[in-house]
Image: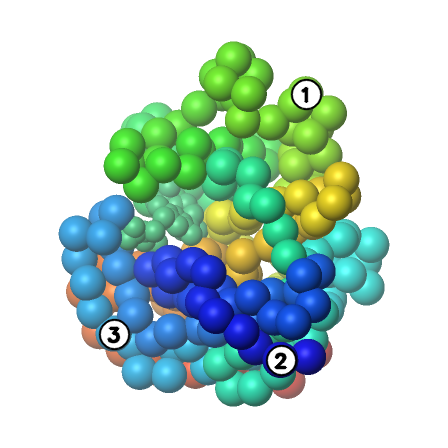
Amino acid sequence: MRRLEQIYEGKAKRVYRTDDPQLYVVEYKDDATAFNGLKKGQIADKGIYNNRISSVVFQLLSKHGIKTHFVKQLSDREMLVKSLRIIPLEVVARNIAAGSLAKRVGLEEGTPMSQTVLEFYYKRDDLGDPLVNDYHIRALNLATPQQLEALARMALDTNRTLTDFLRRCGLLLVDFKLEFGLHGDEILLGDEISPDTCRLWDTTTQEKLDKDRFRRDLGGVEQAYQEVWRRVSEAK
Ligand code: TMP
Ligand code: ASP
């Protein structure tokens, strides 16, 4: 397998074609953005930790029957994945109120939800990724009803598996964001699962160990990513 030209550059990753049309290489960068790119920065070695953490999580999820794009970790910053046509939705699952949900419905951050909340956002940077519901998704043809059902089921399965694993790491899975894509006609979980895309709080102290340290200028950003990797690597 040979890495060929770059086909996409996002805020935190680059994607490359390979000599196998079924496979892409994802390269994890240290770049960090927040508020739809308004805040920019770098988190030293974030790309390395996110690649490692995502690799462990994708392997855990496949062991539990959740189909993902992960093939293998290639290097410090590179992951081999199955090629996907991304479904233009961000699927967010929430167990504890935080961030935009806490604000939208007037709950104090840290309030446990009586059941998991699933949300869909339309992946459109130019619109700031608006919240959409089933009707918008069907009317805009963003996903078929069957695909939408599969996304919800896969997100809830991921939530259960990841919550249990992270509990063993002394981490609360507050909320997280997933992206999915089509490989042929199969729906696979794509993108990454890392402290960039999850809210992770220490179970006993509730200390934030995720990208909110960068978003909210809390300090100790690099240390938080390292600490998540330390705990994940010990529990895997
Ligand atoms: P929110 O509370 O800001 O809507 O974020 C919900 C979850 O989604 C949180 O775990 C962070 C993650 N997230 C992303 O991965 N990318 C994004 O662009 C945003 C806004 C949130
Ligand atoms: N995706 C967001 C951005 O646009 C970052 C975030 O809040 O995670 O910059």
Q: Report the residue at 44% width, 24% height from top.
A: 132
Q: Position of residue 115 (x, y in %)?
A: 60, 33
Q: How many marks?
A: 3
- Quadrant where the image shows the C terminus: bottom right
Query: Badge 1: how crowded within 10 Å, few (<14), some, or many (20+)?
Result: some
Q: Nearer the viewer, residue 111 or 124?
A: 124
Q: Nearer the viewer, residue 165 or 77?
A: 77
Q: Position of residue 206 (x, y in %)?
A: 41, 62
Marker disc for residue 101: none
Which residue corresponds to mark 1? 145
Which quadrant of the view contains residue 17?
Answer: bottom right
Query: Badge 3: how crowded within 10 Å, few (<14), some, or many (20+)?
Result: some
**Nearest-to-viewer mark from 1 and 2:** 2
Q: Report the residue at 17% width, 57% height from top.
A: 39
Q: Nearer the viewer, residue 97 or 72?
A: 72
Which residue corresponds to mark 3? 42
Three-letter residue code for mark 3? Gln
Does label 1 point to a residue whose CB lies under 8 Å from ligand 1?
Answer: no
Q: What is the CA distance from the residue labelled 2 to the residue labelled 3?
A: 29 Å
- Quadrant where the image shows the N terminus: bottom right
Q: Nearer the viewer, residue 103 or 189?
A: 189
Which residue corresponds to mark 2? 2
Q: Report the residue at 46% width, 60% height from top.
A: 7
